[in-house]
Image (cartoon, rainbow, N blue to C red):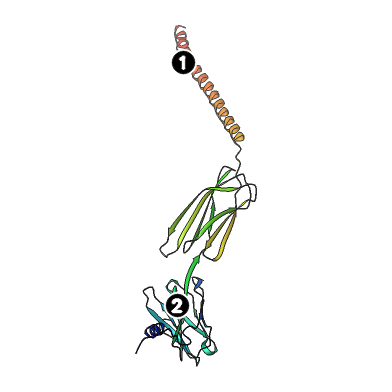
Amino acid sequence: MMTQAAVLTIFFILGVFPKGLTAVIQTQQTVMAAVGEDVHLTCQLMQSRDVLQVTWQKLSPEGERKNLGSCDKNSNQTVNDGFQGKVEFNSYAGLQNCSIVIRKVMEQDEGCYLCLFITFRDGSLTGTTCLQLYELHEPILQIRESNSTEETVVSCSATGRPAPTVTLNVTQQDLYFSHNSTVSVTNTNGTVTVTTTAVLFGSHGNGAQVGCAARLLSVPEIQVFKTIPEVKQTSTDGSTVIIVFVVLACGCVAAVIAVLLKRRYNNRDLEMNETPQAAIKDAYE
């Protein structure tokens, strides 16, 4: 028995194509989905055909096809072993439109899927749609404390798959970022952590905020904002006066103690010098 590819080759040489082989199957070329959510993959036959069965297959990177299941014109649905509870079929009258739902997609579900419309006269008509997963977590924004009102170091990290784009922004117009640096680290689970660090220049008033946006492909971006902490003004004049006062007080106390000790030692020496003379005088008397 000749294969469909051989039949198509003969028709191509003869310049004759059976009716139906040029039928168009409408499907999304790429479906974006977040890890853990349910995904709908659809295939719709744009021309009316006598469809006997629709089969869905998953195409491996090596080119092998693995049957997920099928549904026929009698509304019978079959989900193959290994995909039960994971894949569900949604078919409509005439099987002109047949879709599958993949529950809680994971990394191993990523790839391309084939929908095969098996018709009565035209053989198998195939459509392809590819599932691409993304993962984007809320960015972490950090503002380092600074003793200057003119410079503040800001850092923002975002983790996703594939690598996200991290952008810093400010709400105050006279502030700007400079000395930007970006570092990417690939994690063991396949996600990538991107960290952007920059120096914020300009004098900021109360309530000025720094924002961080994490973007990934065409999915909605995630933004976080944080208020720049006020710079604590330390009064160096008051502390200096206190230190000087303490030093002077300690010096005065030390001087008084030294004078008292010296006077005490002088008095004791005087008493010791006078005591022998008094004893000699008493002896003569």
The residue under the point 53% across, 21% down is 259
Which quadrant would residue 248 be assigned to in this image?
Answer: top right
How packed mark 2 is, by other alpha carbons closer than 10 Å (few <14, some 14-19, many 20 or more), is: many
Distance from Cα at disc 2 to Cα at disc 1: 115 Å
Q: Which residue is mark 1?
A: 272
Q: Which residue is mark 2?
A: 113
**Residue farthest to the left, as pictured:** 1
Location of residue 33 in the rendering, given as x and y in whole percent from the top left corner: 51, 71
Location of residue 116 in the rendering, given as x and y in whole percent from the top left corner: 45, 83
**Residue farthest to the bottom, as pictured:** 74
* Depicted 212 relative to depicted 27: above or below: above
Circle 2 sits in a helix, a strand or a loop, which is it? Answer: strand
With 167 as the anchor, is 185 left or right in this view?
left
User: Can you tell which mark lies on residue 5?
Assistant: none
Tag 1: amino acid: Met
* Depicted 18 relative to depicted 217: above or below: below
**Residue farthest to the top, as pictured:** 284
**Residue farthest to the right, as pictured:** 206
Verify CB contact (< 8 Å) between mark 2 and mark 1.
no
